[in-house]
Image (cartoon, rainbow, N blue to C red):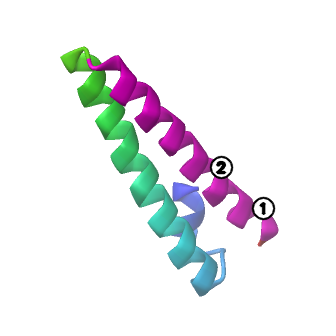
Amino acid sequence: MHWLLQTGTLPLEDREQVRGLTTWADAHYNEVLCSQRAGVFDVALASSESARALSRSAGHVCRQS
């Protein structure tokens, strides 16, 4: 998805939507890493589920384009 954003092969509106979704997914993934290091596994699990859902949504937008 990051590659699609960099190459500009998606329409502008889709690119903006995918960029927003991947930004949020990356933030949740970073939260997973921090939570795991801190031993807060319930937060890590919730964040990983959020990151996965956001990534799937971004992938869906990419496939529709």
Q: Which is nearer the eye, 28 or 59?
A: 28
Residue at 80% x, 68% y is: 64
Q: Secondary structure at mark 1?
A: helix
Q: Residue furthest top?
A: 39
Question: Residue 18 appears at what percent x and percent y?
Answer: 56, 67
Magenta highlight: main SS: helix
The stretch in magenta equals 40-64
Q: Residue furthest right?
A: 64
Tag 1 residue: 63
Give the quarter of the image for residue 59: bottom right
Give the quarter of the image for residue 31: top left
Residue at 73% x, 59% y is: 60
Question: Residue 29 appears at what percent x and percent y?
Answer: 39, 38
Is 53 inside the magenta-drawn segment? yes
Residue at 40% x, 48% y is: 26
**Amino acid type shown at disc 1:** Arg
Is residue 56 depicted above or below 34 in this figure? below
Q: Which is nearer the eye, 34 or 3?
A: 34
